[in-house]
Image: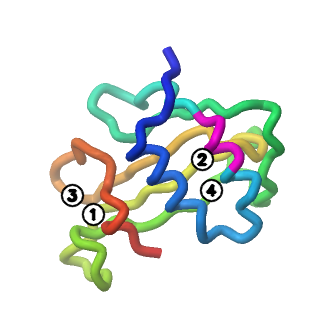
Amino acid sequence: MPRPLSSDERQLLLQIVEVVPHSANLLNQIESAQYDEAWFDGSQSFSILVSAAVPPYSLGGVVKAGRQVGPGATVHEDGSRPTNDNFVGEVFLWLIDGRIADLEYCWVTDDMPDRLPRLDQLVR
């Protein structure tokens, strides 16, 4: 059952798209976005529903069936200058036909993250 995004989820999405050129359509999509479901039990990656009334974002680079890799950021332990020692993973958006469809949080650590990254951990 879809639910409103939490404050942390919304802030993370906003942080990811704020530096994207011509991001107005993505920002409008986030305003209507709802959390749909986690990808699997314990996953911090989740599906997102946005209003069909909001215009799509044109990104280019369709992967398959309208699916595109959208904007993202790398995640580091403390957000300091990236090194191999403090690299945790990446967060990025998946788009379908120009609309936000998923937030993926992939990690390279031994343990799966049990929470979304803090905003100060994001590095572009």
In this rendering, position of residue 17 left or right of residue 43: right
Decide: marks 1, 2 in contact (CB < 8 A)? no
Decide: marks 3, 1 in contact (CB < 8 A)? yes
Disc 1 to disc 2, C-alpha distance = 20 Å
Q: Which residue is mark 2?
A: 94
Q: N-terminal of the two: label 1 or label 2?
A: 1
Spot occupied by residue 56 in the image (x, y as percentages of width and height): 80, 46
Q: Relative to 37, does residue 120 appear above or below in the rendering? A: below
Q: Residue sitting at 74 percent across and 58 percent down? A: 24
Q: Amino acid at mark 2?
A: Trp
Q: Is residue 39 magenta?
A: no
Decide: marks 2, 4 in contact (CB < 8 A)? yes
Spot occupied by residue 15 in the image (x, y as percentages of width and height): 50, 61
Tell me the number on the disc at residue 70: 4
Q: Which residue is mark 3?
A: 109
Is disc 4 placed on a helix, strand or loop?
strand
Disc 4 to disc 1, C-alpha distance = 19 Å
Q: N-terminal of the two: label 3 or label 1?
A: 1
- What's drawn in magenta, residue-wise? 28-33
